[in-house]
Amino acid sequence: MADERLLEVRGLKVQFATEDGVVHAVDGVDFALDRGKVLGIVGESGSGKSVTAMTILGLTRDVNTRFEGEVIYKDRNLLDLPENEMQQYRGAEIGMIFQDPMTSLNPVYRVGDQIVEAIQAHEPVDKRKARRRAVELLRQVGIPNPESRVDDYPHQFSGGMRQRAMIAMALSCNPDVLIADEPTTALDVTIQAQIIELIDQLKDDFNSAVILITHDLGVVAEIADDLLVMYAGRVVEHGGKRPLFYDPQHPYTWGLLGSIPRLDRPRSERLHTIEGSPPSLIRLPQGCKFRPRCPHAFEKCLEEPPLENRVETPGHLDRCWLTVEAKRAVRDETIEGGEPAAA
Amino acid sequence: MEKAWHGLVGDSNPDNKLLSYTTQQDVVQQIKQGIPATFSLTIGASVIWLFFGILVGVIAAVTAGRLSDRAITILALVGISMPVFWLGIVTRYFLAEKNTWFPDGEYVGLTANPVQWAYHLILPWTVLAVLYIGFYGRVLRNNILDTINEDFVRTARAKGLSRREVLTKHVLRNSLIPVVTLFGLDFAGVLGGGAILTEKVFDLHGVGWYAADALDKFDLPPIMGVTLYGAGFIVLLSVLVDLFYAYLDPRIRPT
Amino acid sequence: MGEPATGTEFTLDTAAELAQVEHGAIQGRSPWYLAWRRLRRNYIAFAFLGLFVVIVLACALAPAYASHVAHTGPNANHVLDTITVHGKQVPVVSPGGLINGKLVPSLPIGPQWFNAGGRYLLGADANGRDVAVRLLYGGRNSLVIGIGSALICIVVAVLLSLIAGYFGGWIDFVITRFYDLFYAFPVILLGIALGSALAINGFHHFGITIESGSIWIPTLVISYVLIAYVGRPIRGQILSLREKEFVEAAIAQGARPWRIMVSDLLPNLASSVLVFFTLIIANNIVVEAALSFLGAGVQPPTASWGTLIADGQTLIVTRPWLSLAPGIAIVLTVLSLNVFGDGLRDALDPRAKVRIEH
Ligand SMILES: Nc1ncnc2c1ncn2[C@@H]1O[C@H](COP(=O)(O)OP(=O)(O)OP(=O)(O)O)[C@@H](O)[C@H]1O
Ligand SMILES: [Mg+2]
């Protein structure tokens, strides 16, 4: 089966004008998504993951927002669509799940009614039919007793159940792309795995594609096909899951990999977080944006490195000036959590 | 309350009735006589203020930051800044005395003549409503702007609802919940004699007017009686508001 | 490309304007500086603050106006006097009576503007008193009562709420029940009940004596009836501050309660207290006017804007300015405070929702 291209993002930039200055929240993001695939987007807090996702759905549109680039969904540029046409895409073509299930459902309406609302927004079905479908969807996402639970209010659901309900709502119109923005961050570790598995399974049931956003590489390790690593609004590394995990090229990716909890190490060493904090998105550093925090920075880093293929694996792109040999020599220490060696 | 009552009534009063110092009339009886006028005033005014308060608040919030929002904000503040009795005197002077477009004061019973009833009440209704329109408009505007940033509104937009559906079904519905509480208490306050100024200025012989009239003679028992009557209404209405609130917000509903 | 595809969703344009004018990092600046920066651009708020200052100055200069321009005091009667207007002698209060077979009521002189050399600028009242002079003196009283009662009210409310919020337990219970009690009465009725009782006899308890005509009575009555309306939201804020780490840390380190209240809690309340203060002054000026209008506030012959409106009401048809002038004075004063307070709140953005009524 030939890969069917569903979504392609090209040169996306999003800027917010705020009281404190222009926030360069997304500053050059490119990727493509084929049917049946899972794309993982990872990065620290504030790296622009949510803004990228919401921009795809046109949820960041605002008088104070500026966009550049293209979001091509099945040959239409969504960035150019007027609001009333964009509405047809939201939910029906692209569904979205948000980070915090506690606040993402309206507390004053029954869970079932909120799903019915999503169905009726796109399909001319009567309330009874829509409700039957809501029950069916709740069953599919693993809510016990969906016939009675459908009439519950969100506060009567647990966190994990609310997220399942959110997933049911996002899938209610059978969208081709599902965007899950940190769907598990607010949940217990045990529930996290269940939700991720559910998303993976539903992707096959519904024959769709998934963008899974997280700041935890461990979460995407299981189900992602491709990975996109974001830092300060840009893509710093992009490639298949295996090459990216086994041959990571960007020092920032190493830092992220080092921060995955690993059971084979004593607890005190397990979490190796990256030193320093992300730059202000109003005044970005010159050259490579990771330079101020990078233990391997050198003069060349004052120039911005392009996102290029530098290794043997085709399609594995990164944004770092270090030679591939130099990288391979120093990175294991970073990932293992030892003292970083100077380049 | 019981104790306050006995303190007022005194021991020398065998019927346990609160009597006016000056007229020796039964205060409770007098308050009852004022109720029709006060209810007519309150109910009409509250309909006006609720309708226009919501309208103004929604318009301001939807156009937040633009000229109409700023104009509404200033107008609302003007409404809040006007002493209701002065507004009453001025409108009565300009619209009922200098130009006789409206009847000058007095209350006509609803059952006696519904048209005259409303015609006589239009000015007092409007005057009493002005303050609350300004107040509710601002409260609702700020509530709406807070609610718009809630996560569930983003969810509603992501579902593909139209801007209007998002605004009415999700934003407005949730922003109105706190307004209901305000409304219940304000309604109770006005019903309970809080419209004393309007009633006095327009010569509406309601409960508030009775207290104001007693005040002119420094006749304390009616004032105390009306104050307690007002407290009774507020307590009653707060209970109703709590019940209605539970209906509107399922989170605090007992399961 | 670049422009957003469609029209606006719900937003505030100001952020974009600001961003264009001013770039640069704001990290490390104090919240007060940030608030000031926002407030500074609010020209409307400043214009109204200027208006308020002008009104206050005018009222402060009342004695100068009385002696140098109007040549009369606020309570001086001139029922039988005459003044010179355009070289003619005119009675200040025309006597009325049976003229040409018709019964004519006695009528004070109307506004003279500047025709009478500054005397009776806004006319006279039924007692022949100069309304302009009374307006300024009345303004002094209204402002003193409004500001004074706001001050007392805020101080007491903050103190009670600090104690309630900090100690919690039964102390909190008692103080919140005390607040609830106030909420059970319409503010205006409570004010009337207290104000009229005190207006008759004055206050002679606990070794404190306040005479019945004193403007201390309305000041105290107004501050008293509004304590709960200020205290309740402040207590709420203290409760949420109490949960914050820095307060818990201070407690863990064994800091004394009053120290925590003064150095940890109070500074965090400062911005909302400031906003409350502005808005409460405005509110109290209206409450004073209402109580005085009904006869339960400032007592005659002392002037206040409320009593002036009440005095003028009987002559509204023939001499409307007697009621119009003090009313306009109230509206301008209260409006200026409300607009400025609103701007202040937007700038400081305290979560406190001011809920007051009159
Ligand atoms: N409407 C907005 N106006 C101004 N700045 C914004 C706006 N929305 C997002 N930002 C800023 O853009 C940056 C990127 O935010 P984004 O939410 O995409 O981060 P994220 O990668 O999703 O982080 P997290 O892991 O915390 O969810 C942040 O610094 C945020 O403050
Ligand atoms: Mg995010």
Image: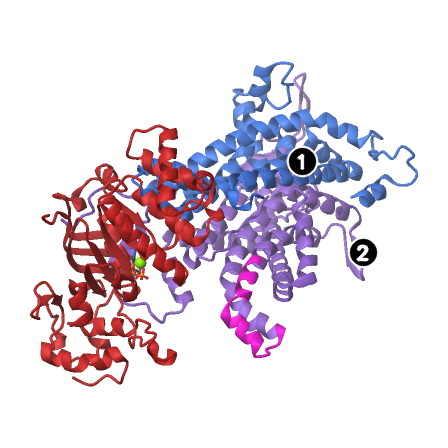
Chain colours: A red, B blue, C purple
Q: Look at the numbered disc 1 and give the secondary structure of its residue.
A: helix
Q: Residues within 10 Å of mark 1 (few under 14, many from 20)?
A: many
Q: Residues within 10 Å of mark 2 (few under 14, many from 20)?
A: few
Mark 1 = which residue? B193
**A122 left or right of A153?**
left
The disc numbered 1 marks a residue on which chain?
A: B
Q: Is residue A321 above or below residue A29?
A: below
Q: Quadrant of ligand 1?
A: bottom left
Which range of residues does the magenta coloring cover?
C236-257
> Is the stretch drawn in magenta largely helix, strand or loop?
helix
* Residues at discs 1 and 2 both on one chain: no
Mark 2 = which residue? C204
Q: Which amino acid lies under the numbered mark 1 shown in the image of this protein?
A: Gly
Q: Which amino acid lies under the numbered mark 2 shown in the image of this protein?
A: His
C-alpha separation, residue under disc 1 versus residue under disc 2: 29 Å
Spot occupied by residue A178 in the image (x, y as percentages of width and height): 26, 48
Q: Is residue A336 above or below residue A113?
A: below
Q: Which is nearer the eye, A214 or B217?
A: A214
**Which image quarter: residue B144?**
top left
